[in-house]
């Protein structure tokens, strides 16, 4: 007879399960001692109190991913199975053969349902008549719709949607997620408590469909298209005004940007800010981004040394930059350095040949190529640095001039 009862907030309460697992597995509580229940009212959720005496532990990413998949399966004992998976891993107890077989089957099922649900959603959205609410119906068993709620929210750029299922309705109002079941009052559902979907949000997210910058930025955080994503600290997305008429595109975040999660805030960023100021451009009026959104580096014992982004990383990141340009629709795009210029012009570029003139871009905006601020920082000769800095400021003035006398 189990002597510990964990009452989770809802049917797909992954964060509740994870927190309970952290304290119970940290105390080596055997799976048989725990009963997992779902609260009938959100207020009756009850997790074990965090135990300072519980050992802290880490489990491989693959184990947690499988646990998250179990939580969204249709298995009635899914939380117990997910717990046993972690417990067996920690204690080295060989997993029960029957449990392994059931988990493998549930995993295949969740993966197939995830693919199916996303195909259905994409198809339905392509036919959606554009009314403010998208309402769909799915016959999925298990909690796959819940774990893909964020996927749908991003596809809808945070506009309202509703998914009707045989036994429940899941609704995003534009501000909050609600779960409704017959005979129950609608319950708010915290999207961050849900398990991550069984398939990554990107690359099968249709980035071209997203219409809000906030949704694109959020989706980019989950991007695992290229290996740099696992390597860098975080995605550094562009920042600035969604209505900016002027966009600046650099190469990739540097060491400081990688840690801060913001573009152009390190030494090159400071020089860039000074030049913008001298050119009479307020950075707050612009949008500043990079061709590649992750820091690519080589480690030495003491430092992380910047490595140039290659064609594969530039191509992998291209949909994010394209989405930023499509949503912001700047009048002028300033390409800072050769990586940005080659990516945006779609050909090999020599800065000295292309800089300081207006180049029409395919979306109707004006392009201008100039040097990258880091180039100025690297110049060894002070006189050359001052001369090149002035040319850089003049390029910025030229770009601002395309907008008329005031940058807004
Ligand atoms: N260099 C870049 O190209 N981008 C940054 O964000 C910082 C340095």
Image: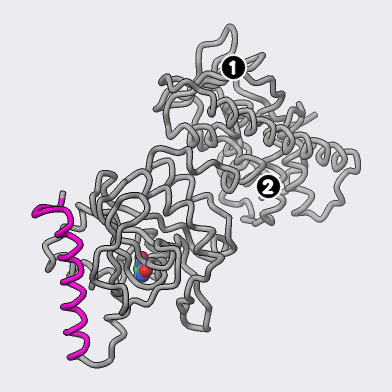
- Mark 2 = which residue? 65
Q: Which mark is residue 374?
A: none
Q: Is residue 31 left or right of residue 138?
A: right
* Disc 1 secondary structure class: strand
Q: Residue at x 54, y 60 (%)?
A: 229
N-terminal label among 2 and 1: 2
From the image, tell me which residue sits under label 1. 164
The residue closer to the viewer here, 386 or 98, is 386
Query: Which percent across, then down, holds residue 97?
Result: 91, 43
Which residues are the magenta region? 383-407
Split into quadrants, the picture shows ligand 1 in the one at bottom left
Q: Are marks 2 and 1 in contact (CB under 8 Å)?
A: no
In three-dimensional space, the C-alpha distance between marks 2 and 1, rounded to whole angstroms, equals 27 Å
Q: Is residue 73 left or right of residue 146?
A: right
Whether residue 43 is visible to the viewer of this picture, yes or no, is no
Tell me the quarter of the picture where residue 110 sits: top right
Q: Can you give x and y, in whole percent of width and height, for residue 64 in the image? A: 67, 48
């Amino acid at each position: 007879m189990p002597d510990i009862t964990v009452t989770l907030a809802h049917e797909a309460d992954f964060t509740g399960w994870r927190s309970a697992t952290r304290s119970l597995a940290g105390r080596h509580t055997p799976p048989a001692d725990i009963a997992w229940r779902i609260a009938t009212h959100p207020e009756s959720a009850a997790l074990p109190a965090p135990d300072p005496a519980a050992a802290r532990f880490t489990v491989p990413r693959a184990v947690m991913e499988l646990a998250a998949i179990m939580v969204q399966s249709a298995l009635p004992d899914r939380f117990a199975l997910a717990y046993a998976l972690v417990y067996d891993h920690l204690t080295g107890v060989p997993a029960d053969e029957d449990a392994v077989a059931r988990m493998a089957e549930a995993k295949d099922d969740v993966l197939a349902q995830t693919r199916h649900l996303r195909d259905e959603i994409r198809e339905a959205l392509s036919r959606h008549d554009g009314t403010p609410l998208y309402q769909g119906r799915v016959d999925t068993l298990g909690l796959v719709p819940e774990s893909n709620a964020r996927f749908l929210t991003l596809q809808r750029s945070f506009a309202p949607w509703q998914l009707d299922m045989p036994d429940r309705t899941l609704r995003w109002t534009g501000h909050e997620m609600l779960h409704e079941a017959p005979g129950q009052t609608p319950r708010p559902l915290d999207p961050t408590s849900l398990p991550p979907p069984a398939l990554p949000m990107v690359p099968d997210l249709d980035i071209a469909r997203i219409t809000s910058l906030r949704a694109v930025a959020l989706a980019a955080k989950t991007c695992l298209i290229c290996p740099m994503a696992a390597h860098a600290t975080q995605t550094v997305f562009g920042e600035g005004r969604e209505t900016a008429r002027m966009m600046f595109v650099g190469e990739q975040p540097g060491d400081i940007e990688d840690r801060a999660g913001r573009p152009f805030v390190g030494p090159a960023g400071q020089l860039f800010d000074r030049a913008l100021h001298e050119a009479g451009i307020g950075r707050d009026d612009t949008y500043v981004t990079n061709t590649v959104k992750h820091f690519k580096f080589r480690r030495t014992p003491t430092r992380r040394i910047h490595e140039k982004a290659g064609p594969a990383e530039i191509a992998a990141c291209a949909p994010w930059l394209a989405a930023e340009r499509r949503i912001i629709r700047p009048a002028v795009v300033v390409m800072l350095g050769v990586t940005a210029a080659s990516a945006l012009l779609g050909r090999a570029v020599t800065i000295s040949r292309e800089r300081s003139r207006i180049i029409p871009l395919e979306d109707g905006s004006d392009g201008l190529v100039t040097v990258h601020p880091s180039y100025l920082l690297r110049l060894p000769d002070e006189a050359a640095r001052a001369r090149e800095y002035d040319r850089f400021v003049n390029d910025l003035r030229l770009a601002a001039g395309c907008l008329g006398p005031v940058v807004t």
